[in-house]
Amino acid sequence: MKFVVKKTGNEQFRFNMVASNGQVVATSETYTRKASALETIASIQKNAGSATLDDETA
């Protein structure tokens, strides 16, 4: 997995989480500041391993 930060057409930022096969598995909201996007990536990298699953399909 890797994160790919991109600049949008309206000068904002977003990132994609990309699997090793090149498929995008998640796309972020847009951020007005690149630093905010990078802070969110850092938070995901730090905290996602302990995320729980809430299956609301049942």
Image (tube, rainbow, N blue to C red):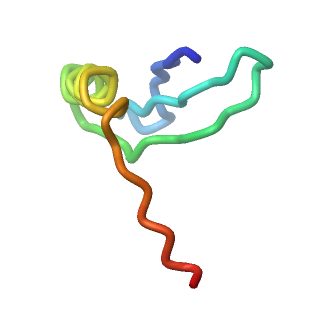
Quadrant of the snapshot with the C terminus: bottom right
Location of residue 11 in the rendering, given as x and y in whole percent from the top left corner: 37, 31
Q: Farthest residue to the bottom: give it.
A: 58
Task: Residue at 54% x, 15% y: name it.
Answer: 2
- The residue at the point 26 percent across, 31 percent down is 47
Vertical arrangement, residue 37 with respect to residue 32, above or below: above
- State the residue at coordinates (26%, 20%): 42
- Residue 14 is situated, as x and y percent measured from the top left of the image, at 42, 33
Q: Which of 51 and 10 is in front in this view?
A: 51
- Left or right placement of residue 41 versus residue 2 in this view: left
Taking 9 as reference, is 42 above or below it?
Answer: above
Q: Give the residue furthest to the right.
A: 21
Residue drawn at x 24%, y 36% is: 32
Which quadrant, please, contains the N terminus?
top right
Considering only vertical position in the picture, is 51 above or below 37?
below
> Where residue 56 sits in the image (x, y, percent)?
49, 78
The quarter of the displayed image where residue 13 is located = top left
